[in-house]
Image: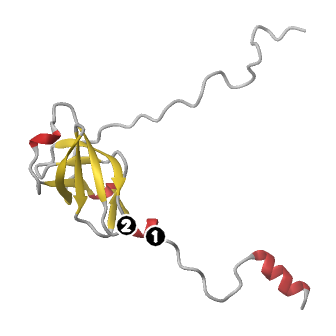
């Protein structure tokens, strides 16, 4: 029996869903101070965070105060109370050209609350599952 030359493909055409293309939306209207330059490490810059209650997104653009992009967040390091992050430098930007203490900035929409990385408190009292509710009615 012939499959009409389609091989094992069935239905809605071939191929995957296609990739999501991120567009450069330009710099944000306002930038917030994210951290301070510590030192250059293998063509990247290491910065310490000055925002104790926020953590940057991975690949979030990092700016100077004048909103010019200098790179993107590459890694996030350190304990929760002393966050460091590395910045992969953009085209033509050299990490060693910065001085210790230079400020770097980020768009406010590229930050996560630190609570996301802390353990969640356990619920106290109360019935917490549908199974427990069923047991209550069964043995009542």
Q: Nearer the viewer, residue 94 or 4?
A: 94
Q: Residue at x 23, y 59 (%)?
A: 48
Q: Quadrant of residue 31?
A: bottom left
Which residue position holds label 1?
118
Q: Against 70, is 79 above or below?
A: below
How packed is label 1: few (under 14 Cα within 10 Å), some, or many (20 or more)?
few
User: Residue 48 vs residue 14: left or right?
Assistant: left
Q: Nearer the viewer, residue 80 or 140?
A: 80
User: Residue 140 vs residue 34: left or right?
Assistant: right
Which residue position holds label 2?
80
Q: Which element type, helix, strand or loop, lies under badge 1?
A: loop
Q: How was the colour assigned to the protein in this rendering? A: secondary structure
Mark 2 or 1: in front is: 2
User: Residue 138 vs residue 64: left or right?
Assistant: right
Find out whether the residues at labels 2 and 1 contact each other: C-beta distance under 8 Å: yes
Q: Residue at x 42, y 34 (%)?
A: 21
The Cα atoms of the two marked residues, 2 and 1, are separated by 8 Å
Q: Position of residue 110 (x, y in %)?
A: 33, 54
Quadrant of the snapshot with the C terminus: bottom right
Q: Quadrant of residue 128?
A: bottom right
Quadrant of the snapshot with the N terminus: top right
Q: Residue at x 14, y 49 (%)?
A: 64
Q: Position of residue 60 (x, y in %)?
A: 32, 48
Q: Which element type, helix, strand or loop, lies under badge 2?
A: loop
Q: Earlier in the sequence, mark 2 or mark 1?
A: 2
């Amino acid at each position: 029996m012939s499959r009409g030359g389609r091989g094992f493909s069935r239905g809605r055409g071939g191929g995957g869903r296609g990739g999501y293309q991120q567009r450069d939306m330009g710099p944000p209207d306002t930038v917030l101070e994210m951290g301070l330059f510590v030192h250059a490490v293998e063509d990247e810059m290491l910065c310490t965070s000055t925002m104790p209650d926020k953590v940057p997104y991975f690949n979030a653009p990092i700016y100077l105060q004048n909103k010019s992009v200098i790179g993107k967040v590459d890694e996030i390091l350190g304990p929760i109370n002393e966050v460091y992050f590395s910045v992969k430098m953009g085209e033509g930007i050299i990490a060693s050209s910065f001085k210790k203490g230079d400020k770097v900035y980020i768009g406010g929409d590229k930050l996560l609350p630190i609570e996301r990385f802390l353990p969640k408190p356990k619920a106290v009292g109360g019935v917490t599952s549908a199974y427990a509710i069923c047991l209550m009615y069964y043995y009542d």
